[in-house]
Every structure is written in C-alpha cells, then in structure tokens.
Amino acid sequence: MCSSDLLLLKAEREPDVLEAPALQWQSDIAAELQLLPDVSRVECLATLEAPRAGLRGLRLERLLPETIDDDAALRARGQFETMPLLKGGLLSADSRLAALPIQLNLPSAEIDGMRRAVSGIQNVLARHPAPTGYETRLTGLPVLRVEIVNDLRLDQWTLIPLAAITYLVVLWFLLDRKSTRLNSSHLVISYAV
C-alpha cells in the first residue's frame, strides 16, 4: 500500500526556499529520508531531474549538483522560473514554501507500520533541523492518522477511568435510593400488620 506524507519547508523571513542553504538542506534531507525502509521515494526541488539529450538518447540528469552553492542556487532559480508546473506544486507562487512529497511503501494500512514510518521521518528531521530562518512541518494522511490514534489512546487513559468512576457513583446513588425505598415500604407493611 502506498501513502504519502508531505514535508513543508517555509521561509520565515525575506530569503525564500530557493536560497543555497535551503536547497542544500532539501537535497540532504531527501537523501537521508530515502534511506528509511518505509520510504520508497522523496521528491524535492534540489533533486529534480530533467531529460538531457546524449549520444545514447535521452537520459535524466539532476538540475542541481550534489553540493549546492550560491551560483548553483541562482541558476536553479532561473530554471525554476521557466517551469510553470512547479509553481503551486513543489513550490509556492511566492517561493517562500517548498513541498517535499514523501512516498511511503507500507505493506498494509496498519497503524504500527504508519507509526514506525512517521517516527522514522520525525527522527531524521530532529537530527537534521532546517537552516536558520526556515521552519518545517510534517503533514499528510499517515501523520494525521498516527496523531489521531495517539490522541485517542491518551484520551482512553483518562476517559475510561472517569467514565467508570461516574458510572459507579450514579449506580451507588441509584442503589442507595432504592434500598431506602425498600426499607420504608417494608416498614409500612410491617406497621400495618
């Protein structure tokens, strides 16, 4: 079963996500995430490939080198401006938000597999924080599902005992009231005889 998470990189101030540190971070984090067993594919601006003509025909080559400096980032900015499909997809219209779709390859929709995949991604993000001036958000159906299940489990630890206590208190009041009624009716019947 394939499902997707989405990692968002947002520029908090004036430089956008097409600056060299942000592109280098995207390249590094994509390579690190690709090593996780539950991740089948990660796409990002820094790892985009374009077809190039060669002697053997067309082949795919990365638009950016492995190590991204300011010159490579400037060239990439020019190339990305000529790719209208990127805007609104991997890149916001104002270039302040970049999306990194993470394709998960889980054997089933079980929560344990999703929890393992999501925690693996979160561990990678904790080891490789975004550059200064940028923030990351992890979202998508697997993340939401794991958060909902975790919240429900946490709620059950408080709601079930509270419900049991409430039920016992109500039951105690009901039984206490019934026993008082039984005793008073028993007295009336005994007095009449």
Image: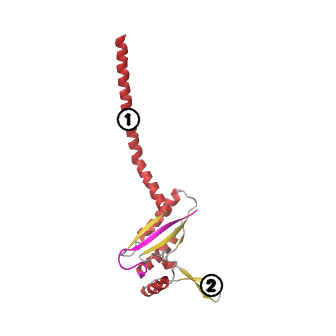
Q: Position of residue 79 (x, y in %)?
A: 49, 85
- Quick one: SS at disc 2? strand
In x, y percent, where is residue 98? 45, 74
How far apart are the two marked residues, 2 and 1, measured between alpha carbons? 76 Å
Give percent across and percent down for residue 61.
56, 83
**Category of crowding for the residue at label 1, using alpha-carbon neighbours closer than 10 angstroms: few (below 14), some (14–19), many (at least 20):** few
Question: 35 left or right of 183?
Answer: right
Residue 180 placement: quadrant? top left
Mark 1, residue position: 170
- The residue at the far right in this view is 56
Q: Is residue 95 above or below residue 121?
A: below
Task: Say the numbered circle drawn on residue 13.
Answer: none
Which residue is found at the position 40% from the left and 79% from the top? 16
In this rendering, the count of numbered labels is 2
Q: Residue at x 37, y 14 (%)?
A: 189
Q: Is residue 123 above or below residue 45?
A: above
Q: Secondary structure at mark 1?
A: helix
Judge whether 101 appears above or below 56 on screen. Answer: above
User: Where does label 2 land, which residue?
Assistant: 58
User: Which amino acid is tagged 1?
Assistant: Val
Q: Which residues are magenta?
A: 1-20
